[in-house]
Image: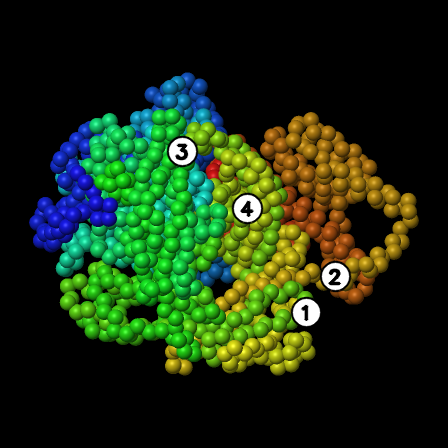
């Protein structure tokens, strides 16, 4: 079979392809089902008809995606009965559970789980060591957002029913009390009624504040002598269950060993698998983070024995699932996930990788991930296929890595008439197949084609069981990629069966040189790549090529005269580059797979290449080239001077003179966009009466004038009946920057006019792409008529940065394009503070998932930062070195967590940090990154972190403008607005904010001061001209804004600093004695009391000091403080009695009569001597109150512990009727302080509890918890649970216990 170098398909074959498309208009049941999983379009059906056993058998595909559900329809076995999924891995670590804690079972066969639940072990489980690794996890951390939302709704229904029952009961008790006691003048009755009311209020508040953080699952891992086993306890899915159901779980091991999975509960129907790492210290629970990965897997290789038409493209292929989407981040891929996935693909000896993920990039074919992919492809001969992206229809929208990496085959999304009629159920399918409107287009910014080939971009494929359906329709290049991948799996299956050497280079060449053109227009190659892949024809090509060397022809291009290659294609995008001919040096480098034999493969390689140009008048090249292993360069001349305005695409390609059937061996893509220049003041360009039909795209290229900063576009539509949906995109390309893209999806329900504001950069060509959505207007035979007008505006100004001084800053504004209204506006809305790590830690990671294929071990670096918020705020951490890049970076990954002193995680993130609202308090930010180069990590140990905090609206600082430099200082008139004349500059000043306007929180912080921090905001200058109504003008936003910053200066010197210290009247000997005494007390406070010996020494010193300084209150107060904070492991009752005894000593040492007398009299606050006495008396009062408070708590504890000892069924003790020690102590405390204050409120809780007023106790405790002066304390929440248990509200007990795991995590966060 021969292949024409310029036209891979003959005219007859093209006609046959189009005939196939047209014949699919009329569907029957069989063709309808076939359209749901398209295979005919790529020739897979023809190939399988000819080779029924080459259906993917023997081929292993690695699915880099959101995870795959092993329970999904069609993903259990292959067509020849093998397990479909070989392994399932969470490469991100989002499902990791810390199981480093090891416990032993008690005599009854129970272990205490990490969640606090008592777990019964199954007696049949073998565990020779009798060591059980335990951990726990909040199950919502393993679920997708949509599944979590569904579970929350179901659980809320059950919870609300129980809470409503409790509310009804509380109302009933309150009504009964009111009926029985119509008058409640008695204080005791008042308290009883108050208690009943507090219970009711509490229940109602719970209903309003309910926030389900999900069940907690316990994880237990052990080694049975041969394998690591895992059991997962999901008893918490059942409200109120105290005992775990671990023994009922059928243990799992690493999925690849037994290929078994579990389900959390019938409610969620969510499958999971487990993998054990690090000798049982880490268990990975693998769930999917979206239906995406399962859907992709189904397209590639699902097998349905009962319904073959719904089979994936390669039903005989096997899979490994490499989850690269992090559940913690919604489903965003991470560097860690990508690297581990590549490691796993090589380890499992996969043949293919499919990755339906990606994003825009700063630099094409660059970065650590690309380097690793190159190694995997070149050395290990894996074929990597990936989606090109869904950011079309504009050019240069292909994403990384699929559309921008040379080693990856990027796939565009195609839709056939059959797919439109069947899967999409449109009224009238299009007459011919086309690329989906949103499919990303090439070229890359360095001129490469971007899209390699196209494949069907939609399917009705399997989805996870938790979606509660078997299949669903999805479309995107995400679906096109696995369709192509499945097609390649068919090729590899045949190659393996026939013993043909497998090379990514050969397969790619076969795909590109045998694809079916979707359009006859050369420029459409930027949309579809080389065309719609054809499996059967590609296989014939491979068979014919089997004895040829496997070579990748790398093309590197640079302008003639430059030694360093800078691109992979020629991309002339500006007006200047189209005004003259240019010469380019083309370097062609044949590349063999790593390990190729020098004498047998490299030395003999020599090919005579004939060069062709698709348009020699534009791209002129030499005729022949002799190519050897060391490569060859040649020059070509590109002459765009005679081209019309618009888009042009050409190719220079090389053909093997001895085997022209091979088609192009290499190609030099040449893309030329010749822009139109807008005219007038302001510069204007318009396009009139442009006709649109479904799927039609119009591209206009405009030379944006220098000085333009925004464009005002107006669209008028006419001539249609049904609603029309349009994509309107504007794209500009800047060096070393992601393409500047503005886009809008607009629906015109009727002929109308719409206006748009488009930010632009002057001096760069802008593509305006307008596309009618492929299915919009189908069924209507009326075309849509478009009138489009764009006017360019701009105000050119200097960069504005306020240096923190009182001086105003000069701004010079100029309009180069036309008259513009100058309306400056500026405000500061954020504060940015820099931090350095307080600690750094390097750690060698586990080799079984963190060792690169090259053998290099990856090392983790954890940096610790500390910061404090004086009030709740929205903050965002930023690390400029690493943020905003996943693929186009030489670093691997990053992840951060923000936690409080209880290790509660408030936020986490990665390369794209987001604002998160957190309450006041002290926080720790852990930042984690990885790399195999330890020297690189060493350089990062002092990595600068910025914290950006949004200011409250009341704190926003609106800056003023002035016509003179001193206007802001002396209060002269402000500058409001002006009209800029084209070419003439106008200057004015922006005043610095006054110190009074600076936010108070900007002056203090965890680093003693935020001096040197920066206030950030925006400044704008122009005004939009369209919109005539007053409301439109009033609500109109500025067209373009720029960043403005203000450096916070050093704070004002403390005026009290340097004042004379008051002269002490005491004699030197007396002062020396006081100093010695105080030093001894400080020494006592600093002593450790960890061991029994240390505690005895501390007590001996206390006795000695009490003898030396009898009844010295500060000493006794310090001893009491020491007893309270250092309890030790001694008898609890004895310890509490010791606290009571010392508290009594403190109480007795204070002259209460003198104290009472003092506080009953008012003193002159300006009397310095009186102030000293006041301070002394306040200290004495506080020490007395603290002693009474500690004594009260100790008495209550003694009472409670003694009650438990005599087995009073653990009921809380009640009053005996007569005044006891506790009551007397409490009464005394109330004389001196407000017991309801946060400092003493705990005693109120205890008092109310002793009197069985549990509702009031609960209210007081909640008030105490709400106090933000200190971090949350676990003992408060434990007490809250106890109170709820005593009241009998089991649903609230269960709810609070789940929240304990959020507020006070029992295990470390695993990065």
Callout 1: SS: loop
Closer to the chain start, of discs 1 and 2, is 1
The residue tagged with tag 4: helix, strand or loop? strand
Expressed as whole percent of the image width and height from the top left, the position of residue 1297 reads: 44, 42
Q: Position of residue 674 (x, y in %)?
A: 36, 64
Instruction: Measure how far apart labels 4 and 1 are at the Cα level.
Output: 35 Å
Marks 3/1 in contact by CB < 8 Å: the verdict is no
Q: Is mark 2 on a helix, strand or loop?
A: loop
Q: Which quadrant: the N terminus?
A: top left
Residue 351 pos. (x, y %): 31, 33
Q: Can residue 1292 be seen by looking at this rendering?
A: no
Q: Which of marks 4 and 3 is in front?
A: 3
Question: Disc number at residue 925?
Answer: 4
Identify which residue is drawn at 46% across, 67% down.
762
Local crowd at mark 1 within 10 Å, few (<14), some, or many (≥20)?
some
Q: Which of marks 2 and 4 is nearer the N terminus?
A: 4
Whichever of callouts 4 and 1 sits on the residue coming sooner in the sequence is 1
Q: Name the residue under label 2.
A: 1053
C-alpha gap between disc 1 and disc 2: 17 Å
Q: Which residue is drawn at 76% across and 58% down?
A: 1174
Distance between the alpha carbons at the discs numbered 2 and 3:
58 Å
* Residue to which mark 1 is pinned: 806
Q: Residue at x 89, y 51 (%)?
A: 1066
Q: Is mark 3 on a helix, strand or loop?
A: helix
If you read the primary sequence from the N terminus, does the residue marked by circle 2 or circle 3 appear first?
A: 3
Marks 3 and 1, the one that precedes in the sequence:
3
Residue beneath label 3, please?
343
Neighbours of disc 2 within 10 Å: few (<14), some (14-19), many (20+): few
């Amino acid at each position: 079979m021969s292949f024409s170098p310029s036209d891979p398909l003959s005219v007859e074959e093209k006609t046959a392809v189009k005939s196939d498309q047209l014949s699919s208009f009329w569907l029957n049941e069989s063709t309808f089902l076939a359209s749901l999983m398209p295979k005919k379009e790529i020739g897979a059906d023809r190939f399988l008809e000819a080779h029924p056993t080459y259906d993917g058998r023997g081929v292993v595909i690695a699915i880099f995606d959101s995870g795959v559900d092993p329970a999904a329809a069609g993903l259990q076995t292959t067509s020849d009965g093998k397990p479909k999924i070989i392994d399932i891995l969470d490469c991100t670590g989002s499902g990791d559970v810390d199981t480093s804690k090891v416990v032993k079972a008690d005599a009854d066969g129970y272990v205490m789980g990490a969640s606090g639940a008592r777990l019964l072990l199954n007696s049949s489980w073998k565990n020779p060591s009798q060591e059980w690794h335990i951990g726990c996890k909040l199950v919502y951390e393993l679920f997708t957002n949509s599944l979590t939302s569904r579970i929350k709704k179901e659980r809320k229904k059950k919870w609300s029913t129980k809470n409503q029952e409790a509310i009804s009961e509380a109302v009933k008790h309150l009504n009964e009390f009111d009926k029985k006691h119509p008058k409640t003048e008695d204080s005791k009755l008042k308290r009883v009624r108050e208690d009943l009311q507090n219970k009711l209020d509490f229940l109602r508040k719970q209903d309003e504040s309910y926030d389900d953080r999900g069940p907690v699952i316990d994880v237990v891992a052990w080694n049975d002598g041969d394998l690591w086993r895992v059991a997962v306890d999901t008893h918490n899915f059942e409200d109120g269950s105290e005992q775990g159901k671990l023994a009922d779980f059928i243990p799992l091991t690493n999925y690849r060993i037994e290929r078994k999975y579990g389900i959390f509960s019938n409610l969620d129907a969510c499958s999971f698998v487990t993998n054990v790492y690090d000798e049982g210290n880490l268990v990975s629970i693998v769930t999917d983070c979206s239906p995406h990965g399962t859907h992709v897997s189904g397209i590639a290789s699902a097998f349905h024995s009962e319904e073959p038409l719904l089979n994936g493209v390669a039903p005989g292929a096997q899979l490994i699932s490499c989850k690269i989407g992090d559940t913690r981040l919604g489903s965003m891929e991470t560097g860690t996930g990508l690297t581990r996935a590549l490691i796993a693909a090589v380890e499992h000896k996969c043949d293919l990788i499919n990755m339906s993920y990606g994003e825009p990039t700063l630099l094409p074919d660059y970065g650590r991930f690309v380097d690793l992919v190159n190694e995997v492809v070149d050395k290990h001969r894996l074929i990597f296929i990936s989606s090109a992206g869904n950011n079309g229809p504009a050019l240069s929208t292909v994403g990384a890595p699929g559309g921008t990496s040379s080693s990856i085959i990027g796939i565009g999304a195609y839709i056939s008439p059959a797919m439109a009629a069947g899967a999409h159920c449109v009224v009238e399918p299009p007459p011919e197949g086309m690329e989906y409107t949103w499919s990303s287009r090439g070229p890359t910014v360095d001129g490469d084609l971007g899209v390699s080939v196209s494949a069907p971009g939609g399917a009705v494929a399997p989805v996870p069981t938790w979606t509660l359906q078997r299949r669903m329709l999805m479309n995107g290049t995400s679906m096109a990629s696995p369709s192509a991948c499945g097609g390649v799996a068919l090729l590899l299956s045949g190659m393996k069966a026939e013993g043909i050497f497998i090379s990514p280079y050969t397969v790619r060449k076969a795909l590109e040189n045998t694809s079916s053109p979707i359009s006859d227009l050369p420029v459409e190659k930027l949309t579809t790549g080389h065309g719609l892949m054809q499996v059967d024809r590609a296989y014939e090509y491979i068979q014919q090529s089997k004895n040829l060397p496997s070579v990748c022809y790398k093309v590197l291009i640079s302008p003639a005269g430059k030694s360093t290659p800078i691109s992979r294609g020629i991309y002339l995008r500006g007006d200047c580059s189209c005004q003259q001919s240019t010469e380019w040096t083309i370097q062609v480098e044949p590349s063999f797979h790593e390990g190729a034999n020098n004498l047998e493969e490299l030395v003999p390689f020599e090919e005579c290449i004939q060069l062709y140009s698709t348009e020699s008048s534009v791209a002129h090249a030499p005729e022949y080239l002799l190519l050897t292993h060391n490569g060859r360069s040649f020059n070509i001349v590109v002459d765009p001077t005679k081209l019309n305005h618009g888009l042009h695409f050409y190719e220079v390609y090389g053909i093997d003179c001895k085997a022209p059937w091979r088609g192009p061996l290499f190609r030099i893509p040449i893309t030329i966009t010749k822009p139109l220049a807008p005219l007038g003041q302001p510069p204007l360009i318009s396009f009139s009466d442009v006709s649109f039909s479904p799927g039609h795209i119009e591209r206009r290229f405009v030379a944006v004038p220098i000085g333009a900063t925004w464009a005002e576009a107006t669209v008028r539509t006419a001539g249609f009946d049904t609603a029309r949906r349009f994509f309107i995109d504007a794209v500009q390309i800047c060096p070393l920057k992601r393409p500047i893209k503005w886009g809008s999806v607009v629906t015109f329900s009727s002929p109308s006019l719409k206006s748009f504001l488009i930010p632009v950069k002057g001096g760069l060509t802008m593509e305006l792409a307008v596309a009618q959505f492929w299915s919009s207007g189908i069924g209507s035979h009326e075309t849509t008529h478009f009138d489009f007008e764009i006017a360019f505006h701009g105000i050119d100004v200097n960069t504005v940065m306020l240096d923190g001084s009182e001086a105003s800053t000069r701004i010079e504004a100029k309009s180069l394009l036309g008259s513009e209204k100058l309306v400056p506006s500026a405000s500061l809305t954020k504060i940015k503070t820099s931090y350095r790590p307080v600690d750094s830690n390097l750690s060698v990671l586990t080799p079984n998932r963190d060792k690169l294929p090259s053998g290099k071990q990856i090392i983790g670096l954890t940096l610790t930062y500390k910061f404090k918020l004086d009030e709740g705020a929205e903050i965002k951490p930023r690390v400029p070195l690493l943020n905003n890049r996943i693929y186009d970076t030489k670093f691997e990954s990053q992840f951060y967590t923000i936690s409080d002193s209880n290790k509660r995680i408030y936020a986490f993130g990665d390369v794209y940090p987001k604002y998160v609202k957190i309450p006041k308090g002290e926080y720790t930010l852990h930042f984690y990154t990885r790399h195999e180069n330890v020297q690189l990590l060493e350089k990062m140990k002092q990595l600068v972190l910025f914290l950006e905090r949004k200011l409250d609206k009341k704190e926003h600082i609106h800056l003023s403008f002035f016509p003179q430099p001193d206007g802001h200082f002396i209060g002269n008139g402000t500058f409001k607005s002006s009209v800029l004349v084209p070419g003439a500059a106008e200057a004015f000043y922006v005043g610095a904010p006054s110190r009074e306007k600076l936010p108070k929180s900007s002056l203090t912080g965890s680093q003693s001061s935020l001096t040197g921090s920066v206030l950030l905001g925006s400044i704008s200058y122009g005004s939009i001209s369209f919109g005539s109504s007053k409301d439109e003008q009033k609500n109109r936003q500025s067209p373009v804004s720029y960043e403005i910053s203000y450096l916070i200066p050093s704070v004002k010197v403390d005026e009290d600093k340097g004042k004379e210290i008051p002269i002490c009247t005491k004699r030197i000997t007396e002062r020396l004695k006081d100093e010695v005494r105080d030093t001894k007390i400080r020494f006592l406070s600093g002593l450790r009391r960890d061991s029994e010996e240390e505690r005895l020494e501390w007590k001996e010193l206390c006795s000695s000091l009490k003898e030396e300084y009898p009844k010295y209150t500060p000493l006794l107060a310090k001893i009491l403080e020491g007893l309270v904070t250092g309890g030790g492991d001694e008898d609890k009752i004895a310890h509490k009695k010791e606290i009571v005894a010392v508290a009594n000593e403190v109480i007795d040492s204070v002259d209460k009569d003198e104290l009472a007398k003092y506080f009953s009299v008012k003193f002159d606050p300006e009397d310095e001597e009186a102030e000293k006495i006041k301070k002394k008396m306040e200290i004495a009062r506080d020490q007395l109150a603290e002693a009474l408070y500690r004594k009260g708590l100790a008495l209550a504890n003694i009472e409670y512990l003694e009650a438990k000892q005599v087995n009073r069924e653990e009921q809380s003790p009640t009053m005996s009727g007569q005044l006891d020690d506790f009551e007397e102590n409490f009464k005394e405390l109330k004389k001196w302080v407000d017991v309801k204050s946060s400092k003493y409120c705990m005693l109120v809780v205890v008092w109310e509890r002793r009197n069985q007023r549990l509702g009031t106790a609960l209210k007081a405790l909640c008030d105490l918890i709400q106090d933000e002066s200190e971090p949350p304390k676990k003992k408060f929440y434990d007490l809250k649970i106890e109170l709820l248990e005593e009241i009998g509200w089991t649903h609230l007990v269960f709810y609070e216990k789940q929240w304990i795991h959020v507020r006070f995590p029992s295990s470390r966060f695993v990065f």
